[in-house]
Structure formats: structure tokens, C-alpha cells
Image: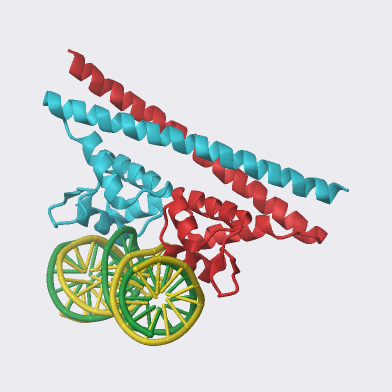
Chain colours: A cyan, B red, C green, D yellow
Amino acid sequence: MKTTREVAQLFQVSSRTLRYYEELGLLKPARSEVNQRLFSKADCTRLKLILRGKRFGFTLEEIKEMVLLFDKDRTGKKQLERTIKFGTEKIEEVEGKIKELQEMKEEMEILLLEFTEKLDK
Amino acid sequence: MKTTREVAQLFQVSSRTLRYYEELGLLKPARSEVNQRLFSKADCTRLKLILRGKRFGFTLEEIKEMVLLFDKDRTGKKQLERTIKFGTEKIEEVEGKIKELQEMKEEMEILLLEFTEKLDK
DNA sequence: CTTGCCTTTTACGTTAACGTCAATGCTAAA
DNA sequence: TTTAGCATTGACGTTAACGTAAAAGGCAAG
């Protein structure tokens, strides 16, 4: 169990950010006897997911949607089917992003090559 | 040469957004005799780059930096070298993002598999 | 010519994602 | 016991990226 300060340092975010994520229902750290936040390993994993989502331009609302869907124990068949559908969609989105990034990379490499040639001659 | 409305529709952004990008120096469309914006093919290409950057969570400031660097004719050797260094860094960033996305995809696929198995039995 | 639809600039409004500050409280050290 | 160093909850401030409304003008149709 880690304190706010520890987690903040570990992930390079402010304590305010952690409180904000809790406010939005993205994190639910336990509390000590004196009401201090205690982050479990699961909380840290979740935070990692949140920060990764952010790095790819997802909003916190979108991230919440994803985290909550993949988090809860989906028992009912209907629920399970919806989760699977959602997951499949998200995976396709990610695939699309990967393709786009690869295009981007190639274009940048071509540009870079041109510049390098200019430099060489 | 396309008008604001045409470009806006084509890229699914508002006219305000186009004006805002011009305000920031990201776009520099020509003007007609009656002072209306005219977007060349180059402007459209640039807009495409901007929107792609946004989709990956870059801020408009970062995008501006990239667009301007890759845009201008870099003549001086020093300038060229700096551009190449910057470009190399950016490509590495993109590579990192691709890797991370692939990890993300794999994790999601594992999760999905678990859910699917639950459903099957 | 005037009505309607487009554009322009100016300027204030809005929302997400925090930053920052104040007031309060526990507690370990001096 | 007082001082210092943490954490807590409000609550107001800030910034990026636009939205939106107002005022003015071009121009083609009726």
C-alpha cells in the first residue's frame, strides 16, 4: 500500500491529479485509520492505464468508460457480450492508430532523408 | 483553391477552428480579392498533419513546432543539422508510441480472450 | 432594392484538466 | 508544548482549444 506522495513521485504526477482522478471515479484508493489515501497495486496498475490513455489523446471520460468496462466482473451474458463488443471495437481503434503512426513515421523518414541529402552535398 | 466552408466540411472541423489555427500561425491561407480565405492543396496537406497530430495527443504548440520545422527551406548547415536532430527525435518518439500501442493491443486481446472464454462455458 | 446567405473581424463564453491557496488536523521531533 | 512537516477538504484561478453571438459587408435571386 502506497501513500499519495509515493505514487505521485513514482508516476510523475501531482497529488492534485490523483485527487482529481478519484473525484472523477477513475481511482478508488482505500483509506487509512486517519483517513489518508492508500493505493494498492491494483490502483497503481489502473493509474498506469489512465496515463497511457492520456498519452494517446483519450479524454478522461473515454478512459473512465474503458477502465470501468474492463474492470468490473461482468457476470450476465448480455453484459459479457457488450464488453466483448466494446473491446473488439477498441482493439480495432488501436490497430488503426498503429497504422497511422507507421505512415507518419515513414513520411517523417522520407523528409529526414531529404534533409540529410541536402546536408551531404 | 478551396473556401473555408469547403475545407471545413472536407475535414469535419468548424470554420472557427480553421481561423484559430491561422491565428496560431499553423495555417496561412491566401485571400481572395474580397478578403476571403483560400486554401491551397499545401494548406490542406498541412491541416491533415495538424489533425493527425491532434489525434495522438500532441498540443497545438507542439504541432506548430513540428510543422514549422519540416516546412521551411532550411538552408544553413546549422539549421539543417538542428532540423535533422529534431526529426530523429520525433521519429524515435513515434516508434515508442507504436510499441506502446502494440503492448496495449496485446493486453486488450488477452482480456478479451478471458471474457470470451467465460462466455463460451 | 431588399431579402437571404455567405463571409469577415471582434470579443466574450465555455469546458476539461488540472494549479494553487487557505483552513484544519494528525504526529513526530525539539 | 510549540514547531515543522505531512495529509485532508473546499474553493477559486488558469490555460488550451475552441464555441457563440454581434456587427458589418459582398452578392446573387426574386
Q: In this view, does B79 lie to the left or right of D5?
A: right
- Could you say which quadrant of the image residue D2 lies in? bottom left
- Residue at the spot 67% in from the left edge and 41% down from the top edge: A109
B100 relative to A47 in the view: left or right: right
* Relative depth, front residue between A111 and A30: A111
**Rendered position, A13 above or below A109:** below
Q: Kindly identify the residue that appears in the image at 76 percent across and 60 percent down.
A: B79
| Quadrant assignment, res C27 | bottom left
Percent across and percent down for residue C4 are: 32, 70
Above or below, C14 relative to B90:
below
Viewer-proximal residue, D13 or B8?
A: B8
At horizontal 78% and vertical 47% (from top left) the residue drawn is: A116
Q: Where is the N terminus of chain B found, in terms of image quarters?
A: bottom right
**Is residue B46 or residue A112 the one in the foreground?**
B46
**For residue C1, above or below residue A82:** below
Residue B109 at least partly seen: yes
Quarter the C terminus of chain B occupies: top left
Residue A40 visible from this viewpoint: no
Tell me where residue A95 appears, x and y as whole percent.
44, 32
In the rendered image, residue A93, in percent from the top left (x then y), is placed at 39, 36
The answer to which of B90 and C23 lies nearer the viewer is: B90
Task: Indicate the position of residue A49 as horizontal and vertical percent values.
Answer: 34, 42
Does residue D4 appear left or right of residue B83 in this picture? left
